[in-house]
Image (cartoon, grey):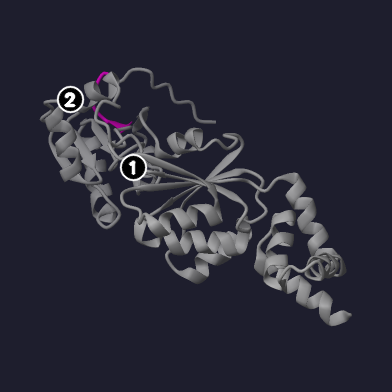
């Protein structure tokens, strides 16, 4: 068992501080973070240009060095050598808590393996901010991070997560939001709910809540910009049971669809209505409907 007592953040050497910085509004920073950033010997920043603006705003002149995905292999040995000299280092990301969606955790692992102290100086987090403002149950929840860029890998992952009962939190970039939401709608069903938090704490902050179908329609008319965090509704027990009925009773699906068709509803509309009632995607209803229909 490893015991780490780290209540003292006095700026002593040989310590790595994980500092949470504002998501957008520069007022969202703690007094402790400001003090540590002033007292450490070096700040390792994911984006030095962005961090310089923060430091300039608060009159902090601590030296900066870059630490991001594409230079981490070279920078980890350098930062370890600085710690060995007895220096203190603060790690910051673009915004929020370092180590969540950046290579910070690799540095933390290396620092701990070398026997140096790691202290967290808490601050804003896009994950928690989006989760609590979404309106969905905040516990239990899971954080998936960025979805795969490749469509095949992304869709495979969404199939794995489809029946996850917990609230989910994802990051996404504006130019992929449309296709990502379409994948969610097709695989999870258009009636599942999502909240898309955009530009949290900034001037044009926006949280769009609704079903996947509704949110897709919104962004079709209002192309997204800025940083995005998606919070998804978990699959309820009722929907899970309905899904089991769907998979095990194709005949019941055929009967439900045919009943609507006989009442004058078009097949596609009937499929959509049954999918909504079951809490699954229209494409899945169609597959089961086609299978059940072929047996009749």
Report crowding for label 1: few under 14, some 14 to 19, many 20 or more residues within 10 A (C-alpha): many
Residue 112 in view, yes or no: yes
Q: Is residue 237 left or right of residue 39?
A: right
The residue where tag 2 is placed is: 38
Q: Residue at x 69, y 56 (%)?
A: 276
| 222 shown above or below 156 | above
* Nearer the observer, 4 or 213: 213
Residue 13 lies in the magenta-colored region: yes
Q: CA distance from mark 1 to mark 2?
A: 28 Å
Q: Quadrant of residue 20?
A: top left
The numbered mark, 1 or 2, whose residue comes first in the sequence reads 2
Total numbered labels placed on residues in the image: 2
The image quadrant where one finds the N terminus is top right
**Badges 1 and 2: C-beta atoms under 8 Å apart?**
no
Q: Position of residue 285 (x, y in %)?
A: 72, 67
Q: Is residue 189 left or right of residue 182?
A: right
Q: Quadrant of residue 256?
A: bottom right
| 7 shown above or below 225 | above
Q: Is residue 185 left or right of residue 145?
A: right
Q: Position of residue 178 (x, y in %)?
A: 43, 61
Q: Position of residue 292 (x, y in %)?
A: 83, 75
The residue where tag 1 is placed is: 199
Per the image, label 1 sits on a secondary structure element best described as: loop
Q: Quadrant of residue 289?
A: bottom right
Q: Residue at x 54, y 35 (%)?
A: 135
Per the image, label 2 sits on a secondary structure element best described as: helix
Residue 251 lies in the magenta-colored region: no
Q: In this picture, which residue range is highlighted in magenta?
A: 10-19
Viewer-nearest of discs 1 and 2:
1
Picture disc at residue 48:
none
Q: Position of residue 36 (x, y in %)?
A: 24, 24
């Amino acid at each position: 068992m490893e015991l780490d007592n780290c209540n003292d953040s006095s700026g002593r050497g040989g310590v790595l501080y994980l500092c949470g910085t504002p998501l957008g509004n520069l007022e969202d920073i703690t007094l402790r973070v400001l003090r540590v950033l002033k007292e450490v010997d070096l700040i390792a920043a994911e984006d030095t240009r962005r961090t310089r603006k923060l430091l300039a705003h608060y009159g902090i002149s601590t030296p900066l060095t870059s630490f991001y995905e594409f230079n981490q292999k070279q920078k980890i040995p350098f930062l370890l050598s600085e710690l060995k000299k007895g220096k203190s280092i603060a790690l910051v990301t673009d915004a929020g808590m370092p180590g969540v969606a950046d290579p910070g955790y690799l540095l933390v692992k290396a620092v701990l393996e070398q026997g140096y102290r790691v202290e967290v100086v808490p601050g804003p987090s896009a994950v928690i901010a989006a989760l609590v403002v979404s309106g969905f149950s905040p516990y239990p929840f899971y954080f998936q991070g960025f979805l795969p860029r490749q469509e095949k890998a992304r869709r495979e992952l969404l199939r794995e997560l489809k029946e996850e009962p917990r609230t989910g939190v994802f990051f996404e970039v504006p130019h992929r939001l449309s296709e990502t939401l379409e994948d969610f709608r097709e695989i999870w069903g258009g009636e599942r709910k999502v909240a898309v938090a955009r530009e949290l704490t900034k001037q044009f902050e926006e949280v769009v809540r609704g079903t996947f179908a509704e949110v897709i329609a919104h962004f079709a008319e209002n192309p997204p910009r800025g940083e995005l965090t998606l919070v998804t509704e978990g699959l309820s027990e009722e929907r899970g049971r309905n899904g089991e009925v769907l998979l095990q009773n194709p005949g019941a699906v055929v009967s439900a669809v045919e009943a609507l068709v006989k009442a004058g509803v078009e097949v596609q509309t009937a499929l959509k209505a049954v999918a909504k009632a079951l809490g699954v995607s229209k494409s899945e209803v169609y597959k089961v409907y086609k299978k059940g229909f072929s047996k009749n």
